[in-house]
């Protein structure tokens, strides 16, 4: 039994997002939210041979994320065969093939969502990746494939740093899944899903838009429901994806479509806490009664603490020169805040953790100056620096509605 079958249904996981679901984002989401499953950003199979250090960086993960799935993309079956071995050697719980990315630079080369137009190649890729996993399970090594010795050593080091072991404790078959869309320029969900089902993937994650739509318009959950009916008794799970803003949306879509699970994407940006109520959703669906899914209220103290934790993790993983990649996350943490527009504008100009701390301290000092007269106990903390004063102030944030996030 693969891990997909062990998760209580519906599966509520973190969707892979290019440029978003890096190692730090997934670590923070796993620690403070706890999705049922996480996926890496998609990784080009060609990087294993032309940019191996990029491959290892993009496939870095933490044990806390398990079950964790490596998502890869490309258009050359032979490379999927070899990279499947690497994914297994890195100890991932599953391998996911991206057949849904709408980006021009990806689709123009026949990868991502462009594979919807080439069902024969799509089937060959799924089959070949599965063969790579099977042959690895049977004992074939990276040396047998003549993989670059430097890459092999880097994989061993990566494993040792993460788990203390240079190789996985045992060779096992890991499940192959596919993430895709409803079609290329129009919906062909019946024909396309039937094609994929013929290769018996463990899971098909279906985004409710075509490539032509990109991320515009509304996700078509009726089409996803048709895919669910097609997959009945096939052994393949169907996960839905698209326009899920909160757990109420998850509850509604699962009830409407009977989908086996969902993946949350943009709603998790700057909001790792969204997954905290997933068990209440599952319980409500099992009971089939009136649903009451609590709203997760996050204090400013916790939000700021997680911002710093995320920033520190990112800087440690990527280094100062790459810290610009953290800026969008910082902006998302401040999204929908009241009275924090200036903080957001400052956050998107930070270059390191020290500057993040400085911005938060300045904001805390500004907040303290505005609300100090409202709190008769606040003067007890006069000896504390502004940021710590903010932490004390946050305990009475119910009275400071302007600060509500």
Image (cartoon, rainbow, N blue to C red):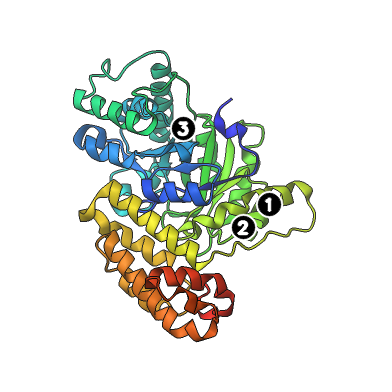
Determine whether the residue tagged by mark 2 lies in a helix, strand or loop. Answer: helix
Judging from the image, what secondary structure is the residue with disc 1 in? Answer: helix
- Seen in the picture, residue 175 relative to 283 is either above or below; the reply is above
In percent of the image, x 46 and y 54: which residue is there? 210
Q: Pointer 2: what residue?
A: 247
Q: Residue at position x 37%, y 63% from top?
A: 330
Q: Indicate the quadrant where residue 289 lies.
A: bottom right
Residue linked to disc 3: 94
Identity of the residue drawn at 39% across and 54% down: 309
- Image position of 69 (left or right of 290): left
Toward which corner of the image does residue 250 lie, by quadrant?
A: bottom right
Decide: is 19 above or below 303: above
Residue 131 in sight in this render: yes
Q: Nearer the viewer, mark 2 or mark 1?
A: 1
Q: How far across and down, in percent of the image, does residue 215 sit?
A: 44, 60
Judging depth in this view, the residue of 398 and 9 nearest the camera is 398
Q: CA distance from mark 3 to mark 2?
A: 25 Å
CB contact under 8 Å: marks 2 and 1: yes
Q: Is residue 316 above or below residue 123?
A: below
Q: Is residue 22 visible?
A: no
Q: Quadrant of the N terminus?
A: top right
Q: Are there few (<14), some (14-19), or many (20+) residues within 10 Å of tag 3?
A: many
Residue 365 falls in which quadrant of the image?
Answer: bottom left
The residue where tag 1 is placed is 280
Q: Earlier in the sequence, mark 3 or mark 2?
A: 3
The x and y percentages for residue 371 are: 48, 83
Task: Measure the alpha-carbon separation of dots 3 and 1.
Answer: 26 Å
């Amino acid at each position: 039994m693969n891990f997909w079958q062990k998760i209580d249904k519906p599966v509520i996981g973190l969707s892979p997002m290019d440029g978003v679901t890096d190692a730090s984002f997934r670590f923070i989401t796993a620690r403070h939210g706890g999705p049922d499953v996480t996926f890496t950003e998609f990784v080009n199979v060609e990087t294993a041979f032309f940019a191996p250090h990029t491959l290892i960086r993009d496939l870095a993960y933490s044990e806390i994320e398990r079950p964790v799935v490596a998502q890869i993309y490309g258009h050359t079956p032979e490379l999927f065969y070899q990279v499947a071995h690497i994914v297994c050697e890195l100890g991932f719980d599953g391998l996911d093939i991206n057949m849904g990315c709408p980006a021009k630079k990806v689709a123009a080369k026949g990868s991502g969502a462009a594979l919807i137009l080439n069902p024969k190649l799509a089937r060959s890729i799924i089959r070949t990746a599965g063969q790579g996993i099977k042959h690895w399970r049977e004992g074939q090594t990276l040396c047998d494939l003549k993989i670059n010795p430097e890459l092999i050593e880097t994989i061993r080091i990566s494993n040792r740093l993460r788990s203390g072991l240079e190789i996985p404790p045992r060779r096992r078959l890991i499940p192959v899944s596919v993430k895709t869309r409803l079609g290329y320029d129009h919906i062909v969900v019946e024909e396309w899903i039937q094609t994929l089902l013929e290769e018996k993937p463990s899971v098909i994650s279906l985004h409710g838009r075509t490539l032509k739509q990109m991320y515009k318009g509304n996700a078509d959950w009726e089409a996803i429901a048709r895919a669910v009916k097609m997959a009945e008794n096939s052994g393949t799970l169907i996960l839905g994806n698209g326009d899920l803003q909160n757990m109420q949306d998850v509850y509604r879509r699962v009830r409407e479509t009977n989908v086996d699970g969902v993946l949350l994407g943009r709603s998790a940006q700057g909001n790792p806490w969204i997954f905290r109520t997933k068990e209440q959703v599952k319980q409500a669906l099992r009971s089939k009664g009136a649903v009451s899914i609590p709203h997760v209220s996050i204090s400013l103290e916790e939000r700021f603490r997680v911002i710093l934790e995320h920033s520190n993790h990112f800087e440690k993983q990527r280094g100062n020169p790459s810290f610009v990649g953290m800026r969008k996350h910082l902006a998302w943490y401040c999204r929908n805040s009241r009275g924090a527009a200036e903080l957001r504008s400052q956050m998107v100009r930070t270059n390191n953790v020290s500057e993040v701390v400085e911005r938060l301290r300045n904001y805390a000092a500004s907040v303290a100056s505005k609300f100090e007269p409202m709190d008769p106990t606040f003067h007890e903390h006069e000896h504390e620096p502004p940021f710590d004063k903010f932490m004390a102030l946050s305990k009475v944030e119910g009275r400071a509605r302007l600060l509500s996030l």
